[in-house]
Amino acid sequence: MQEKKTVSRRNFLVKSSIGTLGVFALGTSVGCAPIRRGIAGFANTAEFPYQGNKKDPMVWFEVTKENKVILYSPKVEMGQGIFTGFAQIVADEMEVNIDQVVVRNAPTTYANSDKAVTGGSLSMIGLWQPLRELAATMREMIKGEAAKKLGVAVSNLSVKDGVISSSNKTMTYAEAVQGVEKWSIPQTPKLKNPKNYKYVGKPVPRVDLNEKVFGTAIFGMDATFPNLIYGALVHPPSIGAQARKIDISTAEKMPGVVKVFNEKHFIGVAANTYIEAENAKRAIKVEWQVPTVWQQEDIDNIITVGNGKDHVIQKAGNALKAFKNNEDVLELEFRSPLGSHAQMEPCGATASANGDIVTIHMATQGPRAMAKYISKKLGIKQENIHVTSQYLGGGFGRRQEDINALAATVMSQKTGKPVKCFFNRQEEFQNDPMRPPTHNVLRGTLTSDGMIEALEHQVASGKVVFNSTFLPGIARKVIGADPGSWRGGMIQYSDIPNIRTVCWMNDLPFETNSWRSLGLLANTFAIESFLDELAIKAKKDPVQFRLAHISDDEAGERLKNTIKAAAEKANYKDEVVNGKAMGFACSTDVNTPCAQVAEVSIENGQIKVHKVTCALDAGLVVNPDQVNAQCEGALTMGLSAVMFERMYIKDNKIKPTIYGPYGMALMKHAPKEIEVVLLEGTGTPGGIGEPPLGPIGAAIANAVRRLTGQRLTEIPLNLKT
């Protein structure tokens, strides 16, 4: 076997216990509208690769004396089951039992720490091939060392469950790696055919199940250091409020106070206990200056099609000319509100600083991005900031830059003690960089035979990924329009002669950011509701109407097969039967087509969802049980968002601030039955975590249209009386 390089022994290899957007750099040509649209089209379908070390297996794996294999994952586990999928790949390519694989988050000090973040439904897409190659290469490296110790040729060795055999000689992986000083990394061996895998493609129990069930799992709020003290921050009471005068004299005298802070980036206090820190925080007197008092009406006026800067991101034919030449133009407007992430675990961090060496434990979707953020704010070298992500009590795009991590670091530097600093629940709601509101305007015309002649979608939104660590700065300049805001907004029905999609960008007086599926939920609600109305106008079956406008290329065939699978499984009928109606909708996100049928009735004047049938083509499925669970969780979260959830601005304050007033779906609101149909239209994994959120809002609204005749155009969905 040809060797590529030799590396030194890593001291972590054996332990006693288990403990791109460079393609956008197109120079001056990016000002050209066709090129911008081309870039937007690429961004809409691109599956961005993992941004880290893909060559050295030894920064990915440890082999313990107990003959366990530890994988250090560059993608974090936030409930999506990605650790289990990765363990299945490792077990198959390294020839170990699934119970021998342990998965841990990679700290930023490890070379495989991802430069990007965990999000966008891209974890399995990005690591499917690299992880297989790394695991297979590590297997061959260990076999090579075993061959030397056993005095046999590598070709005479076989492996099963981490035990290497040759005739009557055996050796465990742990024994093979013991004492090795120099490691030879061979060329990547031939990978197994996925059809021959023992674990991939099979329903395997979650590898993190036991520790989460029995309470030993460490989440962000559980992280600790010896001699820990607690931090609490004073936050502005309203939008844009700035501290004018600060009096800390009373707070400094409060029991347990270690130090009161009036820093460039925050005002707060560190104390011996959480309660003492909270009490002292309340004793800090701040005089606030509020330049503008905002109301919800002001926000709605800002986020309206026609305001701000417009970007044409999709164009075919000449939709504007078609509208001008056809007097019968259907036009509808749709709106969605501000939405909270509302994750169970508030954001925060635990930091220990020793001079300019900082260790941070927190629940974050981007450990390296967080280290970069701290480095930029405090002037500490990024390589001296060691961030390790714990388990996340919900992510959904919320876990990015965090003022608590910054404050905990400064407090630890200035007190000489580790500091834990977290939002309380009210602060979490008030400081949540929310899902932005949207305004969608759609226009369409039909031919004499009931086919779509022209279709235009205009969307106005606040910033999504332009405010996040998800997107490199170069992409903001090149794309122009925030791709998060128009995610799901491009028209997927490519067999329409005239298409136009426009994104309007404007600034809000507060931060908005990524929310699970980004713009997919609101944009699909608008587009698929409008398609349904066009089908009604054309007097055609909505399923057949959609199929007739989808091209026959590979992407089109996958979407058509998904639509057919959902309709067939649900036994879709375009009629009201026994007080129930079915609504149909579909979308394509991260190259994963998804179609849903919602069976709905009206009970006591309220919308009741009885069943949802979801068909999804996620390509090669690593763990079907986990994919089913992701579909169920995503569409239930989407149902909650479109039926109940709404944040709003009143007298310059963000409301509500607790779970009760912030309406969310309860158990009684969940469908009694969710049926998932999985298709495998490609030979590699696709995105899972977000695509099922797309169709659910329109599917429910389309069912309501048949039941009541009402076209609901605002989220949350409320029947008109």
Image: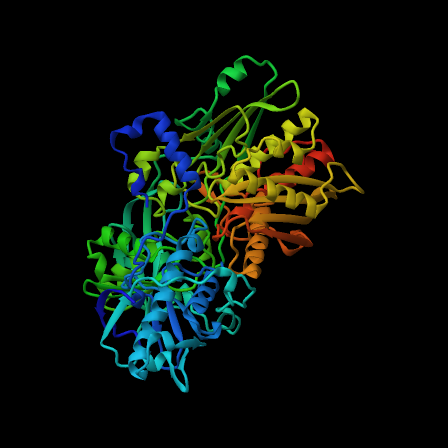
Answer left or right for 668 relative to 629: right
540 vs 205: above or below: above
Answer left or right for 18 relative to 694: left
Q: How many marks?
A: 0
- Quadrant of the snapshot with the N terminus: bottom left
Q: Nearer the viewer, residue 330 or 185?
A: 185
- Quadrant of the snapshot with the C terminus: top right
Q: Position of residue 197 (x, y in %)?
A: 50, 65
618 vs 462: above or below: below
Answer left or right for 418 relative to 518: left
Residue shown at the point (29%, 74%) measured from the top left: 12
Among all residues in the image, which is located at the extreme bottom?
Answer: 168
28 vs 180: above or below: above
Q: What's the coloring here?
A: rainbow
Q: Position of residue 216 (x, y in %)?
A: 46, 73
Residue shown at the point (36%, 25%) measured from the top left: 33
Q: Quadrant of residue 276?
A: bottom left
Q: Position of residue 587 (x, y in %)?
A: 55, 40
Q: Nearer the viewer, residue 292 or 569?
A: 569
Residue 590 seen from this side: yes
Q: Position of residue 148 (x, y in %)?
A: 28, 80
Residue 507 seen from this side: no
